Image (cartoon, helix red, strand yellow):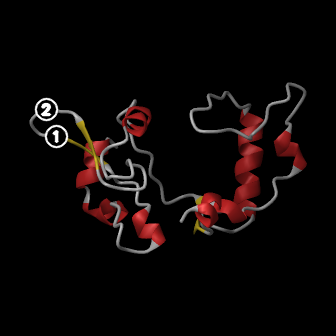
Amino acid sequence: MTFEQYWDDPRFQRKKPNLRGSKKQAFGDNIYSRDGNTGRWRQANSHHSLKDGNPNPANVCADTGTNRVLYSDDYVYWGGSGPRLPTKFLQYGSRGVSLIARRGHKNNFPQALIEDFVAWIRSRGEKGYRGEPLDWSRTP
């Protein structure tokens, strides 16, 4: 869906940051909408903004480069307490393809790797939010 759809959708209103709420509420990610007059992106005051609450231009640029939001109810998020990856996923096959990636990483994973990885995740029987992000322990 687009950022505008995400912002307006009643299902995702709880994802808007509440800096006076719990840590999880304060880190809400439903932070972008368009200014009706200028069409420019607005960034809600959040941990993604500058300390004074103004939009962080670097984050706005990086986050809105594509007007799409990925959402799903078929996921598992382990945060900083995730399981150790089996060795076969750290360096897969003779080409040395690794599943270790960062934001913006482009990939072309072999279909067999994708199927093996999905099967491994599903075999754990876990879904949804399972643990806090690793860096929360360092965030004041």
**In this picture, residue 84 sits left or right of residue 9:** right
Relative to the observer, which residue lies in front, 75 or 140? 140
Q: Give coordinates of residue 129: x percent, y percent.
A: 56, 67
Within-10-Å neighbours for mark 2: few <14, some 14–19, many 20+: few
Q: Is residue 55 above or below residue 137?
A: above
Asked which secondary structure carries label 1, the reply is loop
Please, what is the three-letter code of the amino acid marked with disc 1? Asp
Instruction: Name the residue tied to disc 1.
Output: 35
- Is residue 77 visible to us here? no
- Is residue 37 visible to us here? yes
Q: Which residue does the image show at 29% across and 52% down from the upper left?
A: 44
Q: Residue furthest left?
A: 37
Q: Residue furthest top?
A: 95
Within-10-Å neighbours for mark 1: few <14, some 14–19, many 20+: few
Relative to the observer, which residue lies in front, 108 or 137? 137
Q: Do residues under tags 2 and 1 come within 8 Å of each other at their CB atoms?
A: yes
Please, what is the three-letter code of the amino acid marked with disc 2? Thr
Instruction: Name the residue tied to disc 2.
Output: 38
Q: Give coordinates of residue 62: x percent, y percent.
A: 44, 33
The circle drawn on residue 81 is: none
Quadrant in which residue 38 is drawn: top left
Q: Residue furthest front?
A: 52
Q: Which residue does the image show at 62% across and 62% down from the upper left?
A: 138
Q: Check the picture and name the quadrant holding the N terminus.
A: top left
Q: Which residue does the image show at 34% across and 67% down from the upper left?
A: 18
Q: Give coordinates of residue 98: x percent, y percent.
A: 78, 36
Q: CA distance from mark 2 to mark 1?
A: 6 Å
Q: Give coordinates of residue 26: x percent, y percent.
A: 41, 65
Q: Is residue 23 above or below residue 134?
A: below
Asked which secondary structure carries label 2, the reply is loop
